[in-house]
Amino acid sequence: MAQPIKVERTVTIEKSAEDLYRFWHTLENLPHFTRHLKSVKVYDDGRSHWVTSAPMGNSVEWDARITEDRPNEVIAWTSVEGADIANSGSVRFQPAPGDRGTEVKVITTYDAPAGVVGDAIAKLFGENPKQQIGDDLARFKMLMETGEIATNEGQPSGRRS
Amino acid sequence: MKAVCWQGANKVEVETVPDPKIINPGDAVIRITSTAICGSDLHLYDGFIPTMEQGDILGHEFMGEVVEVGSEVKRIKVGDRVVNPFPIACGHCFFCKQTLTSLCDNTNPNAFMAEALMGYSPSGIFGYSHMLGGYAGGQAEYARVPHADVGLYKIPNGLTDEQVLFLSDIFPTGYMAAENCDIKPGHVVAIWGCGPVAQFAIRSAFLLGAERVIAIDRVPERLQMAKDGGAEVLDFEQVDVGEALKEMTGGRGPDAVMDAVGMEAHGMGLEGLYDKAKQAVRLETDRPPALRQAILACRKGGTVSVPGVYGGFVDKIPLGAFMNKALTMKTGQTHVHRYFAPLLEHIQNGDIDPSFVITHRLPLEQAPQGYEIFKHKKDHCIKIVLKPGQST
């Protein structure tokens, strides 16, 4: 098995830790701003089921449980036994200096096993997993600060395909 | 609709493309009544701005009538007559709150591209490469405008398109460049370039209290327009600009200098050949002779204002002169939003009629000829306004 891959990114958002924590704590909200996460469903026992899109119409799925939850400070999770890809992550909220809102730090760790699924996850996270997480955080910031996510998809061009 | 599409270096075509539609709840769609070709569009036309793609719709100086609004648009209504600012701003982020709207955090969906080149991304800009958002531009019959409530500026009755169109870019750009000169009573400002932005910078410098403005170019009709605006002029092909400025300012040098030329300045002699050769093989992305000369000419403790557009890297900037003379540089894409109200007031008061800069009016369909005329400064061209829906 390959070494776990760890990715860390931080963004500052002009909202209170309380607002940001509340949005994130409803895990079903995450696919609103993540590029690859298709859905998160929370079960009654607190566990959750995560589905991400993968290349060629495939998906990667796992169940996760919350490992740490301190209101307005941190949420951490880890996949449980039987996940396609063993992974864990956390999001931390910390007031930014000078009344600039909240620093939001996301750390994710995942195993990248060999084989077909390993290849899929490598493609999923692209050449640069740090950028993918960074882009997701940029979209989270857009959604929280402005209520929408900037896009140029669906606009006209004179491209000849 | 018809739109002006970039097809590669030195090639634009007017094509029929799908009409834009509302994508986000804060969007509006406007029917464009007037749209201009900007000097900075020539950097795209010449192929010096990276991340352009075949088919991209150009144009960032436009105005028109609102025809559709998204569900979250409150202030702007269908039927409003509006001018659009070239940078796209969200109105909520750290930068927008300080009216630094061209630095908006939340409007560039391709921020990662700009971050790779610049560390951090400026705002999205209409029709100005994928690195700056990949937004379809306004040299078209219609355009989608994100964050319409923040950006679109309603125009009162009684003013023509030509009087207010340039609030979208070049009037605020010239004005901010003059503000960046930190003008105090008695100051002399020297401006490299007499293109449209410089023409507004000259007039803005006087509005802000400059004693004298000295403008530098080599194109006779541009020098004449600068004179008409009250500037003294220098032809850089006829005189040694540094020497001339020194003599004209009692040996002190200008209090502030401005590079209103940017990345494709024309150098003289060996220096000019050096930059042209390096830029041609992409060892240097931008040619900076105007900036070099401005730094050397500036008086000690003076200010260097740079409204000219740069895209990447330049060589041989005299940083020693800059440091030892204790100069200050001020620059940036224009924070257009904050200039709408004060500059509209100047127009309404009759302090300035921005239409003075227009030399050519063409139907949108003639944009390809327009780019050629403008690029080569044929037919005494200084500024072209395109009118959609005017050809028969």
Image: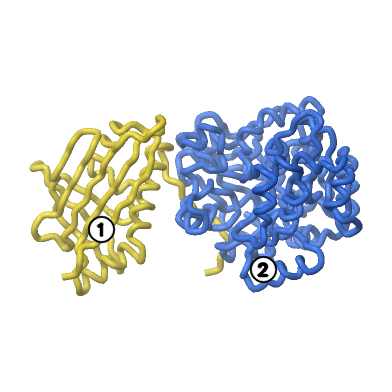
Chain colours: A yellow, B blue
What's the chain of the residue with tag 1?
A
Residue indicated by mark 1: A6
The vertical placement of B346 against B103, above or below, is above
Q: Quadrant of residue B7?
A: bottom right
Question: Residue placed farthest to the top in the image?
Answer: B349
Q: Quadrant of residue A143?
A: top left
Res B165 visible? no
Q: Is residue B74 left or right of residue B234?
A: left
Kindly identify the residue that appears in the image at 21 percent across and 60 percent down. Answer: A110
Which structural element holds mark 2? helix
**Residue B361 x, y percent position in the rendering:** 81, 50
Circle 2 is placed at which residue position? B279
Q: Which residue is located at x 64 percent, y 68 percent?
A: B8
Label number found at residue A18: none
Where does the image place residue B22, in percent across and percent down from the top left?
50, 45
Give the structural element (helix, strand or loop) at label 1: strand
The amino acid marked with disc number 1 is Lys
